[in-house]
Amino acid sequence: MYNKGTIIPGLIIFVLFVTFPLWFNAFSTAASTVPKPELPPGGEKACIAPAAEMRANHMVMLNEWRDDVLRDGDRVAVTVDGKQYRKGLQMACMQCHSNKEKFCDSCHEYASVKPYCWDCHLTQSALATKKETH
Amino acid sequence: MDKQRRKFLKIAGATALAGISAPAVVKLTSTPALASSGHGKAAEHGAAEHKPEGHGGEDSAKGVRLGMLIDMRKLYGHPELLEKVAAACIKVHNIPQIEGNKNEIKWIWDMAYKNVFPEHSSYHSSKITEENNFLVLCNHCDEPPCVRVCPTKATFRDEKTGIVSMDFHRCIGCRFCMMGCPYGARSFNWMDPRPYIKEYNPDFPTRMRGVVEKCNFCGERRALGQEPACVEAVKDVGAIVFGDLNDPDSEIRQILDKEHTIQRKPSLGTKPSVFYIV
Ligand code: SF4
Ligand code: SF4
Ligand code: SF4
């Protein structure tokens, strides 16, 4: 091979350069930015489905609930392990996951998704700005 | 003239003619079964259309049709009861209180007789109709024009209950439904309603800017086995009765069968499900 002395070190430098992000991540000690959503402050352990499924599909389930309740008039509560959950973001999910900022937002911000649920649905912090009626 | 060109024009003309007349030929030669069913439908339709519309002109009932009866006799001279009714609805549905005709959001409110019943008003009406205001809300019409015009089906008729529902998630704020509704039962959120809501009901959402809203016949309360909030507010005088208009044994039907009632603007053929005793 001609120019062995330049090509081989050049290749090594190139490979190192291209894989730099991997090395950097492996050896960096900086805190991980992966979100850690807060577990329900009330200490509830069970959700209506396992965490992995909720993480992947909660938005689908919410859309289904919305259509059940509003379009098909099916407001029958969902019962899981003897606990009843009324179909609704405010009426089921946010009863346990009461802190939207520390739960919902932590992942949504990380994933840069901007759901507009809370343009209408009320969070605890929004409720706290006004006297509650019940 | 060039012979070839002449031939081309002939063929082109014949083809165009065949293309234009094809639909007509297909229609004429379609199967007799199809054709006769089409005729049957047309005849039925015609018959329905010739019936007198409005109060008393409705076809016999099928399925559930929720409706309301407002007995104004029990509310005359009690404007505070009208206010109590509106306040109950405002509280459970997080309705903003915004001043001004254009911006205000109303689900149930009161108006003068001549505005509520323009078709029934008369020269020299009685003192009682002159002096009192009348409760008005969405009529949950059986032939709702708002549903017809809604391009997104955000406003739709719930076939299980006969009520005219809204799915706020779908509303794009085009306000066609407000043009369509002859009763002014719909309000548009010109601005963020939240600052104008006095207190929140944590069980119900608010709306956002750019969405239309109206009475939902308390769908969320009926799911819990409760009566509509306005019915409950004047329960002690029994001024509002709520129930299935198609069930001959329901309380509302018993009263409808006995008393003379009127609907708002019956000649429009919207078939309101809200009845009044005045
Ligand atoms: S009163 Fe108006 S909004 Fe209500 S159903 Fe009839 S047309 Fe629609
Ligand atoms: S404003 Fe909303 S509900 Fe009304 S017609 Fe448009 S989309 Fe439908
Ligand atoms: S039925 Fe419910 S939503 Fe409709 S006016 Fe009465 S309280 Fe309001």
Image (cartoon, coloured by chain):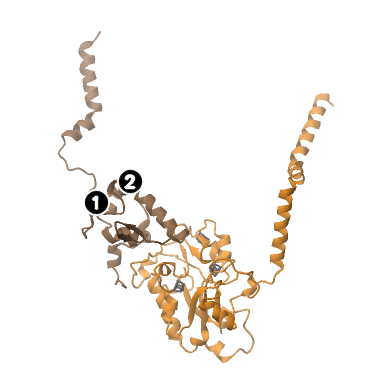
Chain colours: A brown, B orange
Chain letter of the residue beneath label 2 in the structure image: A
- As shown in the figure, which amino acid type bears the numbered disc 1? Pro
Horizontal side of B229 relative to B249 (left or right) equals left
Real-space Cα separation, disc 1 to disc 2, in angstroms: 14 Å
Quarter-of-image position of residue B209: bottom left
Residue A43, given in percent of the width and then of the height, sits at 20, 58
Chain letter of the residue beneath label 1 in the structure image: A
Q: Earlier in the sequence, mark 1 or mark 2?
A: 1
Query: What residue sits right under mark 1 in the picture?
Result: A37
The mark found on residue A22 in the picture is none
Tell me if mark 1 has few (under 14), some (14-19) or many (20+) residues whose alpha carbon lies within 10 angstroms of its own: some
Residue A108, given in percent of the width and then of the height, sits at 31, 50
Query: What residue sits right under mark 2 in the picture?
Result: A56
* Residue occupying the far right of the picture: B1
Horizontal side of B24 relative to B169 (left or right) equals right
Residue B28, given in percent of the width and then of the height, sits at 77, 46
Residue at the image point whose x is 47% and y is 70% from the top: B217
**Looking at the image, is mark 1 or mark 2 nearer the viewer?**
2
Residue at the image point whose x is 24% and y is 23% from the top: A15
Most foreground residue, A123 or A53? A53
Tell me if mark 2 has few (under 14), some (14-19) or many (20+) residues whose alpha carbon lies within 10 angstroms of its own: few
